[in-house]
Image: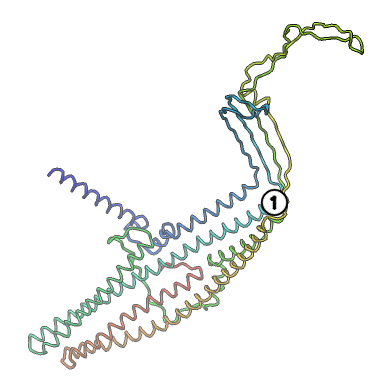
Amino acid sequence: MKKMSNKVLLLALGLTMGSFGSAMAQQQGAGSDGIWSLEEAINYAKTNNLNVRQSSLNRDLNRADLNQSRASRLPSINANGNYSFNTGSFQDPVSFSLQTQNARTSNVSINASLPLFAGFQQVNQIKQNSLALEASEQEYQSAQNDITIQIVTAYLNILFANEQMNVSDLQRNLTRQQLTRTQSLFKAGSVAENAVLDIESQLATDELNYITAQNQRDISRLTLMQLLNIPTTEEFQIEIPEIPEPDANPVIVDGSQVYDVALQTLPAIRAAELRLRSSETGVDLARGAYYPRLSLFAGAGSRYASTSRRLLAIERIPDGRVPQTVYFTKEGNESETLWFDNFENRRIDEYYGMFSQWDDNLNTQVGVSLQIPILNSLQARTNVQRAKLQQQNAQLNADIARNNLRQTIEQAYVDAIAAQRRYAAARQQVNASEKNFRNAELRLQGGVINTVDFNIIANTYRSAQSSLVQAKYDYTFKLKVLDFYQGKDLSF
């Protein structure tokens, strides 16, 4: 029983800590009251959204490539060394003689090289990587812009769903009041039972409309939390700003003017243009393989073998006497055997240490290397052709980006005009249907019309209210899109 209690305690503690961690993650970007404003959501998403973070990593990778291309102009210095134990037959690295014994050998060296000329490839590589870094910076800003639009869309969807919920709740309360009055009239015998049933049916429809708006609100909240890359929680709340009623005749900037501004300020367009310039440099980079390569090199090295001994002297040691016949005449018929002293040469040496051998066997070299490309399986020619095709592709990408931008702005401008007209018409419809609804309420209370006719008028009024709310937020969003392409602030 005690073990079970401990398990329950640990489980409760784990759930509590998990909820606390989730709440802390939610509060990171929110204000002191834990409610997210639009500005706070945008700033948080620009830092924590996964797509934005990935774009930031791509920018850092391009920066590393640029630093490496700049460092390639520095000398290259490398040291090498080895130490080995040899058995059997091997070539002595010091005397270059063939030895058949156990020995220890070692070689050490250090080499340096400095490129002097490489067909301007190093210069063009630095230029290309610099343009790539600028392009990735613009793409990072473009990713932030994209997430900004997505945050604004999700935020407005929540506001729209909230207002739809308010409208549905108001309609539901009005229907409840109407149901109470109708039930009283039915009990008094003033109306038939079907009047009560009609109002109850309408109340069920209003409940369904409220739940639909609530579900849409929850889906929009989930979308916003996912864009923010925070754990989903029921405690998530956003600030409800006062969305002003759109002006009847607002100043909508012409689409061509918006396009001219966007061409100069939009990061996605600048990124495409920088990628094009980078591809143009890539052609020059590939052509550099046609040129000779000139480099300066220098090196030093030494070697050691345990079989080597330091020579001190050569000692002549007597080794007995040897006979030699001496002839006195040409005919060789007169000779005499003489005895001469014989000597043997013997080496006098001592242990030859590793460091001493390294010092005595030191060798150095310095020179210039020239490499002239003649035929390398047509690699240089193929790389130039590939670079030209990449340049053409970059040109098409830039044209596509500008064309998509133009079409998007043109569509946004037309949508804004259409939303303006729709909102004006929806407002007139609400004003007219509201008057008709109020009049119908009075006629229903007076028994002039039945509940069926009243519900038709009431539904028309409810539909007009929903259309007005939708037109309001649609119009607001379309204007925000145009503001975005002009580089304006998207706050409310």
Q: Position of residue 146 (x, y in %)?
A: 46, 66
- Pick the residue in front: 86 or 70: 86
Residue 392, percent from left and from top: 61, 68
Q: Quadrant of the C terminus?
A: bottom left
Q: Quadrant of residue 437?
A: bottom left
Left or right position of 364 against 264: right
Q: Residues within 10 Å of mark 1 (few under 14, many from 20)?
A: some
258 shown above or below 374: below
- Note whether 342 is above or below 146 in the view shown: above
Q: Residue type at mark 1?
A: Ala
Q: 381 or 39, which lies in front?
A: 381
Up/down of 91 relative to 252, above or below? above
Give the percent coordinates (x, y) of residue 336: 85, 6
Q: How many marks?
A: 1
Colour scheme in the image?
A: rainbow
Q: Quadrant of the N terminus?
A: top left
Residue placed furthest toward the bottom: 448
Pick the residue in front: 406 or 109: 109
Q: Quadrant of residue 219?
A: bottom left
Task: Name the quadrant containing residue 375.
Answer: bottom right
Task: Tell me if 201 is positioned left or right of 116 in this view.
Answer: left
User: As displayed, is residue 156 above or below residue 338?
Assistant: below
Query: In x, y percent, where is residue 28?
Result: 36, 55
Q: Give 108 or 23, whichever is nearer the viewer.
A: 108
Q: Which residue is mark 1?
A: 118
Q: Residue at x 80, y 6 (%)?
A: 339
Q: Which residue is situated farthest in the right direction here?
A: 330
Looking at the rendered structure, the secondary structure element under dot 1 is loop
